Amino acid sequence: MKQIRILLAAVFTLAFALPAMAEKLSLNAISAYLNGLKTASADFTQVNSDGSIATGKLYLKRPGQARFQYNSDKTLVLATANRVAIFDAKSNQPPEQYPLVKTPLNLILARNIDLNRNKMVTGYSSDGAKTLVTAQDPEHPEYGSIQLVFTASPVELRQWVITDQAGAKTTTILNNLQKGGDYPSSLFSIDLQMAREN
């Protein structure tokens, strides 16, 4: 009997030590959070579809601008002026470039984010601690999707998973997200980066 009481006491202690269950965030609250995220920086860990892992620093300047600086191989990904460019430090070739609108990243870099748009959200759930929203361009679902993961109190973006046109998944986990900051446009400039490398 004494062992049972000790066991029950341990279970109750553990239960109260766990974080409280959070309510599922509304799509309106998530849209408002993203629209309010004008500038931000974060350390990131990226898990690629082949299982490889990379780390780096992310800078966001909405609308339309992002900079991913990778630590290990000095790869740089820039999004600006409706383009995404991948600078590979190991290559002597010009950067690969894609229209931003054809990538799921465009959904969080857009000027006005409204997750209530018809057919934009394809998945919306909560596990009690996090709210997960999967979104796509309703006019071009073939461009892929992005799953956003948020915590509440306060609302904060923790990670996203991009599924590309081929079905490959890339997970980006954010750490030490700092909202605000005055980042010059040159930090995101594809043309300036190309000029530096020539």
Image: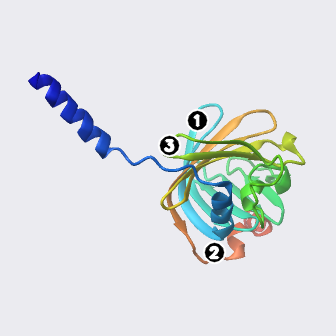
Quadrant of the drawing holding the C terminus: bottom right
Residue found 57% across the figure and 64% down from its top: 41
Disc 2 target residue? 183
Element on which disc 2 rests: loop
Can residue 167 be seen in this snapshot?
A: yes
- Viewer-closest of 6 and 109: 6
Q: Which label lies toward us, 1 or 3?
A: 3
How many residues crowd mark 2 within 10 Å: few (<14), some (14–19), many (20+)?
some
How many residues crowd mark 3 within 10 Å: few (<14), some (14–19), many (20+)?
few
Element on which disc 3 rests: loop
Which numbered dot is residue 52? 1
Looking at the image, the residue that sits furthest to the left is 2
User: In the picture provided, is 94 more to the left or to the right than 18?
Assistant: right
Label 3 near label 1: C-beta < 8 Å?
no
Sequence-first disc among 1 and 3: 1
Return the x and y of residue 68 as percentages of the image width and height: 64, 57
Return the x and y of residue 26 as percentages of the image width and height: 63, 54
Residue found 82% across the figure and 56% down from its top: 100
Disc 3 target residue? 128
Sequence-first disc among 2 and 3: 3
- Quarter of the image holding residue 14? top left
Mark 2 to mark 3: distance in Å?
Answer: 35 Å
- Quarter of the image holding residue 141? top right
Mark 1 to mark 3: distance in Å?
Answer: 29 Å
- Viewer-closest of 123 and 78: 123
Task: Report the amino acid beneath label 3.
Answer: Gly
Return the x and y of residue 128 as percentages of the image width and height: 50, 43
Element on which disc 1 rests: loop
Task: Report the amino acid beneath label 1.
Answer: Ser
Task: Report the amino acid beneath label 2.
Answer: Tyr
Which numbered dot is residue 81? none
